[in-house]
Image: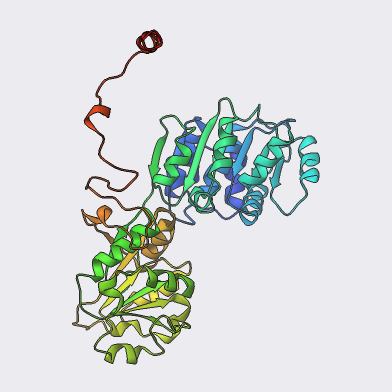
Amino acid sequence: MLLENLKLSKALTKSMVEAGFLGATEVQAQSISRIIGAQDLIISAPEDSGKTTSYILGTLMRLKFSLEEAPRVLILVPDKEKVLKVIEQYNLLNKNQTIKVIGLYADQSIETQINTLSDGADIVVATPDRARVIYLKLGLNLNKIIMFIVDDAELIVKKGLQLPVMELARSIKRCQHLIFTQVIHSKLHQMVDAFMNFPIQIEIESTLENKLATRDQLLYLVPDFFTKINLLNSILSQQQQKTLIFVNNRLTAYKLFKNIIPEIINKTAIFNSLSIDQPGFNSIDNFLIDPNIYFMIVAYEDMDEIKAHHISRLIHFEVPEEIELYLKSVMLFNTNETTELLSVVFSTDIELNLIKKIENAIGIKIKQVDLPIDLSKKSNKNSKIKISSEEPVGEAFHTKKLSNSKDFNYSSREKAKMNQKRKHK
């Protein structure tokens, strides 16, 4: 799409051309006119698709070119690096120096940042926790905010910064809300639904190119760690073939091993185990020739010692931060391989952005499959809570005498009359 079709001011169009933008991305084409129109939006798009540039152009179009004492735009981002990146982008595109942009993050003293804000600002780019602290110290005036923007929202959720985002949003009486994210999931909705009313949702799918040769892949979306454990136990209990189970580190490997159900644990080992309490192997060959061990837990840090293409079944219990580790395990080196090769990955909401990066890298969408219907009924063997359909027994739970059982309640007036009668007997 041509830049002229975005209907930007001549100054902004010129700034875009000078900055090397020769055309508009799909996310910019679908969002900028709506941003200028002050609509509430939730925009989901891949990394490097132009999300940040979209709201920068939108804010510069909406703001009047004059310095205000109180900021009119609040932009929340996950960390200092993103704060600096956004400010750099503003400096690149904003040729009118009357628009003042200030960054708030933890590396500077709060007093210094409050003093800087007191000199006036139009746009504040901040991490949620630092913005909240300064707001509570009465250093951040939200009375004139007309645009509330959350960028990289999925990373903010991953860092557990939802509460300051919601508190800041609710402290603003009325404004436009813009949410930019790579993925949309339930935890994200829990954060933004608290302050957004009927937003327009725009989802831009990534362009999947350069399809790589990989083994078949399946994706399970799970709510939490313990559901992953139950799912793993369910899958392993139904198969008797050599399987590698990948986790992020050895600490997780030991934790996972302790939660393997009894009928499977004797068939399970840990790669490069450092404890005598857990059986392990120091080489993939020893695992392959052992007739009694079918499953081995491997930390991603030990991937260099593993040749995963020898194993027909892989389970990625966790999604690695370095997606190259995942790619290394699923890529086929011999495209004429006739053996059925499968890779299964478990992902929670906060890991979905990594799944998106993996899909972009391999050029295909990983097929999602439903969780087993009875999975929620299966409990962790170490869980302290047990649900039983049987009647509770024991001293604290005995059957009531018939004389003590009732299916009615007396009103306070009736109780008072009954007490009065007892006193006169």
* Structure colour scheme: rainbow
In the image, residue 56 above or below residue 146? below
User: Residue at horizontal 40%, vertical 78%?
Assistant: 298
User: Residue at horizontal 68%, vertical 34%?
Assistant: 71
Q: Foreground residue, 147 or 385?
A: 385
- In the rendered image, residue 24, in percent from the top left (x then y), is placed at 47, 48
In the image, residue 51 above or below residue 372? above
Location of the C terminus by quadrant is top left
User: Residue at horizontal 70%, vertical 52%?
Assistant: 106
- In the rendered image, residue 74, in percent from the top left (x then y), is placed at 62, 38
Q: Foreground residue, 256 or 398?
A: 398
Location of residue 326 (image quadrant): bottom left
**How many labels, in total?**
0
Residue 2 visible in the snapshot: no
Q: Indicate left or right for 415 with 117 as reference.
A: left
Q: Foreground residue, 337 or 192?
A: 192
In the image, residue 151 above or below residue 196? below
Residue 136 visible in the snapshot: yes
Q: Residue furthest front?
A: 425
Q: Indicate left or right for 134 with 312 as reference.
A: right
- In the rendered image, residue 283, in percent from the top left (x then y), is placed at 39, 90
- In the rendered image, residue 404, in percent from the top left (x then y), is placed at 27, 28
